[in-house]
Image: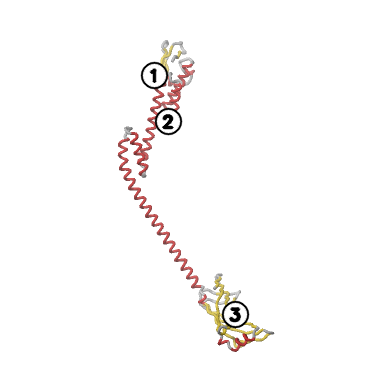
Amino acid sequence: MALTCKNCGGNINFDINTKIMTCESCGSSQSINTVVGENDSIYTSNEDSENIDTYRNALNLMTSATEIGGLKTAKMLFESIPDTLNSRSLSKECEEKITLLKTETQYQKALLDMQSEDADTIALAQNVFEALQDYKDSMSKKEECNSLIEKARVLQAEKVKKEQQQARRRRFKRRIISVILIIFLIIGLLVNNYIHSASRYEIEITPTIKNYLTERGNNYEFCYDVKVENNGLIDITALECSVIIQKDDDVITDTTISFDNYSSVAVRAQKNARFTWNLTTNSQYVAEQLYYNFDDLDLEIKITKIKFKNGKIKTY
């Protein structure tokens, strides 16, 4: 490398150890670290001076780099000027620093993984310490991992056991809740059936004193007194039922009747109410049976529909 002094044109020597440039003739000197550009240097511009600028940039980057990327850039710059000053040795130094930084990064990560509660993570840290061998206290850390792994496995086993117990408790609670819901559902159905059971309502049909009313054309009209007894807990607003009157296997009449009170209730809870039912037939035989033999006939009265005051409609 040949650098020429700006002041006297003499040759400039460079001390690799002190990083000081000194003119052989006039004695002018300058630290390479203080050179910012060509105007600040004691040497004139030439091919070697350009390499010096690259060298200076690489040296500053190498000195200040705290990450692998910066060191790799410095190494690349030194490799681009292999014959300038001690670029070859500094390139190797960058490589060593890169290796050292990688090793330190692995070491620090392994230290962090040692704090884990996961046995597998601690085992990975132990493998790293084993690979690092004599780097710092890697071997003692490797041995320390043995007890940490065992402790982590115990803790993990306890955690798994606890989670299993919690899962069993959750399943048990869900079963209990399901059973309770089913019980409430059954109770609700039973209560509903009990409250609205047709057996709680009784209907009696008897002829009035003037049972036979009149004959109109071919029709015969009869009048009956109907007593509806509400033994339930809810007022009834309307009621429908089927009525079958028969003599042995001979059906005299098969019809439906309904009772309601649109302005109020038809039958109060725990009360009874009376209604009048007019039955019309065009059969002389049926009329005779109803008039002469009513007490000997079989009445089958079946409730088919009830509308309650609470708005519920129940069919049977």
Left or right of 212: which side holds 140?
left
Left or right of 139: which side holds 90?
right
**Mark 3 in CB contact with mark 2 (< 8 angstroms):** no
Mark in the foreground, 1 or 2: 2
**Mark carried by residue 16:** 1
Residue for point 37% across, 42% down: 121
- Residue 140, given in percent of the width and then of the height, sits at 30, 37
Residue 268 position (above or below residue 121): below
The residue sitting at the front extreme is: 249
- Closer to us: 133 or 204: 133
Amino acid carrying mark 2 in the image: Ile
Under circle 3, the secondary element is: strand
First in sequence, mark 3 or 2: give its number.
2
First in sequence, mark 1 or 3: give its number.
1
- Quadrant location of the C terminus in the rendered image: bottom right
Cα distance, mark 1 to mark 3? Answer: 127 Å
Left or right of 110: which side holds 76?
right
Cα distance, mark 3 to mark 2? Answer: 103 Å
Mark in the foreground, 3 or 2: 3
Residue at numbered disc 3: 254
Residue for point 46% across, 11% down: 9
Residue for point 47% across, 66% down: 185
Under circle 1, the secondary element is: loop
- Residue 170, given in percent of the width and then of the height, sits at 41, 57
Residue at numbered disc 2: 68
- Quadrant location of the N terminus in the rendered image: top left
Left or right of 284: which side holds 309?
left
Under circle 2, the secondary element is: helix
Quarter residue 143 falls in: top left
Question: Callout 2: few (<14), some (14-19), or many (20+) C-alpha neighbours within 10 Å?
Answer: some
